[in-house]
Image (cartoon, rainbow, N blue to C red):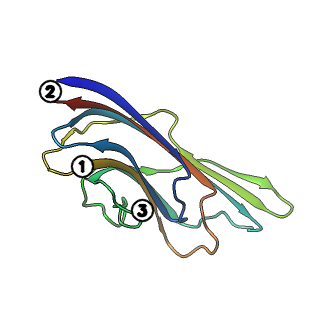
Amino acid sequence: MADGWVRATASNPNNSGFFGSVPLILVQPTQTVLRSWWNLGLYYLSSDENVYPPGNSILRAGVVYAEAGLEPLETPTPISNAGDDWMAITTMNPTGVQLSRATNVAWQINWGFPIDLSIKSQRRNDTENDMTMYLAYEFGLSGEIEGFTLTGWWCSIDALIRTPD
């Protein structure tokens, strides 16, 4: 058996405002994910709004283990698809909210983890098809916020993968 670390990162892979996902680590048949770490950062800049955006909301993020090759709109998201095979899932709170300027109001909101989070879950691919570790986030908003689209996001996963000889 051979064990090896795989690292995958992405910046702004897709950006639909309320949710996003990206395939990061491929797990081939007979391979096992032994250990993983993940991180996610998001930011939003809103101009010309005099109230704290994006309103009453919850942000969930996580790493889901699903079949390879899913399109962004097919990938499970942590609020709408909470029952899927999540290796890690958490609620994120803003790490920073600041009024960037008072004239022509602009708010900047940041979400993110100060360190990589450990995934305490293993997966062995016992299927005949490739599987993937997708990183996904989703906002659950109390109401529509016109024009709300994340300005940017980035993420990473490190995984120790075992491949049988």
Q: Which residue in the structure is indicated by mark 2?
A: 165
For badge 1, the amino acid type reads Asp
User: Which type of secondary structure does the marked residue at label 3 adopt?
Assistant: loop
For badge 3, the amino acid type reads Pro
Q: Are marks 3 and 2 in contact (CB under 8 Å)?
A: no
Marks 2/1: CA–CA distance: 18 Å
Marks 3/2: CA–CA distance: 33 Å
Residue 21 appears at what percent x and percent y?
43, 56
Could you say which quadrant of the image residue 29 lies in? Answer: top left
User: In the picture shown, does residue 25 fall above or below 165?
Assistant: below
Q: Which residue in the structure is indicated by mark 3?
A: 72
Q: Earlier in the sequence, mark 1 or mark 3?
A: 3
Neighbour tally class for label 2: few under 14, some 14-19, many 20 plus, Cα within 10 Å: few
User: Which type of secondary structure does the marked residue at label 1 adopt?
Assistant: loop
Residue 39 appears at what percent x and percent y?
46, 40
Tell me: 20 left or right of 46. Answer: left
**Towards the viewer: 47 or 165:** 165
User: In the picture shown, does residue 110 fall above or below 113?
Assistant: below
Residue for point 75% across, 67% down: 50
Residue 130 numbered mark, or none: 1
Residue 160 appears at what percent x and percent y?
30, 30
Q: Earlier in the sequence, mark 3 or mark 2?
A: 3
